[in-house]
Image (cartoon, grey):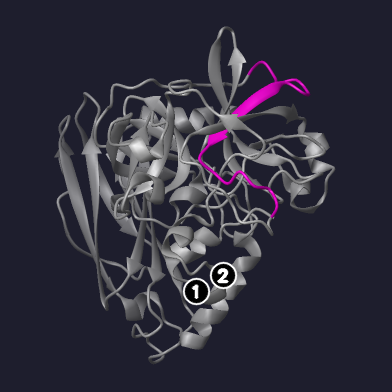
């Protein structure tokens, strides 16, 4: 099954025998790479993008997911790639081919904000697995065109997927992680054929597409997550999918599943063309008893507009301490901020509470009093953080980590 234990490791939820003892292997053992493919030609996929942790010793060690550059400072990836990492803790590298030569290849860019599709659910669902990354700059780099609704793909049509993931399908064999970008061709599989496999495949909807061979052998794998699935169309290349999940890597009767780019064309356009930059999705690991968060809203349009209301949920565990947004008129290129505070006791009221989600809604005076929804996800870093019901909680912490294994292993893994 596709394994995302890398996410667990990044969150500090799994230790001991799950990971290798050598630090280098531990950095790469849950990565996703292409199965049954070949090295790509340098410059062949110049829009290909790597998500890289800032604190890693180099780009090869830090790469944890794939992505694609859309141009104008926007990157497309999978939601599960960015749901457990703060946007300040990673950067993107556009057009890199050899991760060991990232310092002289492609273009590095810092992350400004992350936007996760609002319908991306939780651990029980694999649907709507798509996210946009807004960059602080607008790198002059090749962009990939996205497939839109209209002409349908045909059964068996050749698609190409690429990434820096595991090249070994056998789970009992030590994985191999090349630093050179790999690619593989896989045929399009109609949704009904994919659903007929049963298991989790039966629930695949219009938001996803399948690709692969009935016999397996060629596929994307853990860590290729977020990377593009493309095809040749009208003399050019268009992206049709985003690497998401599957049952194993290149296994028989287990196709790869990809977010359907055409299905999300309106959502992608709405975010990119909104004229507003804001911290729609924020993940924060809580390491101290006091929690502070800053949300920024910037007017990236050419017209001034105002913020009419800022609303927390009725039972919110957050407090607005200061803000420069309410009743403010934002001129083009101007920004405002909202400062929030809470405590670990409020966020995690029980010993086994490990995650908490809080929402905030901002109303503007734009068309139909447009509302901006902010989602903040807090993860409890240590079991001994104080909660309202006492201290400790290491047993609950361990059990929670083990319970997550049931769903994490199905997703194409985020490389640790």
323 or 97, which is in the foreground? Answer: 97
Q: What residue did someone put label 1 on?
A: 15
Q: What residue did someone put label 2 on?
A: 18
Circle number at residue 242: none
The spot of residue 113 in percent (x, y) is 32, 44
Residue 368 lies in quadrant: top left
Residue at 25% across, 27% down:
301
**Residue farthest toward the top in the current orientation of the protein:** 235
**Mark 2 falls on what kind of element?**
helix
Left or right? Give the position of 22 relative to 108: right
Q: Quadrant of the N terminus?
A: bottom right
Residue at 47% across, 40% down:
66
The spot of residue 283 in percent (x, y) is 37, 58
Residue at 69% across, 59% down:
172
User: For residue 151: magenta?
Assistant: yes
**Mark 1 falls on what kind of element?**
loop
The spot of residue 206 in percent (x, y) is 68, 35
Label 1 crowd bin: few (<14), some (14–19), many (20+), radius 10 Å: few
| Magenta extent | 150-170
172 or 416, which is in the foreground? Answer: 172
Q: CA distance from mark 2 to mark 1?
A: 6 Å
> Residues at badges 2 and 1 in contact (C-beta under 8 Å)?
yes
Q: With respect to residue 67, does 27 lie above or below?
A: below
Left or right? Give the position of 72 relative to 41: left
**Residue farthest toward the bottom in the current orientation of the protein:** 390
Residue at 59% across, 7% down:
234
Q: With respect to residue 230, does 30 lie above or below?
A: below
- Residue 327 visible in the picture: no
């Amino acid at each position: 099954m596709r394994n995302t234990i890398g996410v667990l490791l990044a969150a500090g939820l799994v230790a001991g025998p799950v990971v290798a003892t050598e630090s280098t292997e531990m950095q790469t053992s849950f990565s996703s790479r292409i199965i049954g493919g070949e090295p790509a030609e340098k410059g062949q996929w110049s829009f290909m993008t790597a998500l890289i942790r800032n604190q890693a010793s180099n780009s090869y060690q830090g790469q944890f997911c794939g992505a694609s550059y859309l141009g104008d400072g926007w990157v497309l990836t999978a939601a599960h790639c960015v749901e457990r990492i703060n946007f300040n803790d990673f950067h993107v590298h556009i057009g890199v081919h050899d991760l060991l030569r990232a310092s002289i290849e492609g273009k590095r860019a810092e992350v400004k904000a992350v936007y996760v599709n609002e319908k991306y659910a939780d651990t029980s669902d694999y649907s709507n697995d798509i996210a946009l990354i807004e960059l602080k700059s607008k790198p002059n780099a090749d962009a990939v065109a996205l497939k839109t609704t209209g002409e349908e793909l045909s059964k068996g049509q050749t698609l190409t997927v690429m990434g820096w993931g595991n090249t070994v399908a056998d789970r009992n064999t030590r994985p191999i992680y090349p630093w050179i970008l790999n690619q593989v061709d896989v045929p399009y599989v109609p949704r009904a054929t994919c659903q007929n496999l049963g298991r989790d495949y039966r629930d695949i909807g219009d938001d996803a597409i399948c690709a692969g061979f009935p016999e397996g052998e060629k596929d994307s794998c853990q860590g290729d997550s977020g990377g593009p699935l493309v095809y040749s169309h009208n003399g050019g290349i268009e992206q049709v999918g985003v690497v998401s999940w599957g049952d194993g890597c290149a296994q028989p009767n287990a196709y790869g599943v990809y977010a359907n780019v055409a299905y999300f064309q309106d959502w992608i356009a709405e975010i990119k063309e909104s004229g507003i930059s804001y911290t729609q999705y924020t993940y924060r690991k809580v390491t101290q008893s006091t929690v502070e968060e800053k949300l920024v809203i910037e007017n990236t349009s050419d017209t001034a507009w105002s913020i009419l209301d800022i609303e927390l949920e009725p039972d919110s565990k957050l407090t607005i301490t200061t803000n420069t947004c309410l009743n403010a008129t934002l001129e083009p290129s101007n920004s405002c901020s909202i400062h929030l505070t809470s405590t670990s006791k409020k966020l995690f009221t029980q010993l086994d509470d490990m995650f908490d989600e809080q929402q905030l809604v901002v109303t503007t005076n734009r068309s139909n009093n447009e509302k901006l929804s902010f989602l903040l996800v807090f993860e409890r870093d240590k079991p001994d953080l104080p909660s309202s019901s006492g201290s400790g909680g290491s047993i609950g912490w361990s059990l929670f980590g083990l319970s997550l294994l049931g769903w994490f292993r199905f997703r194409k893994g985020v490389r640790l």
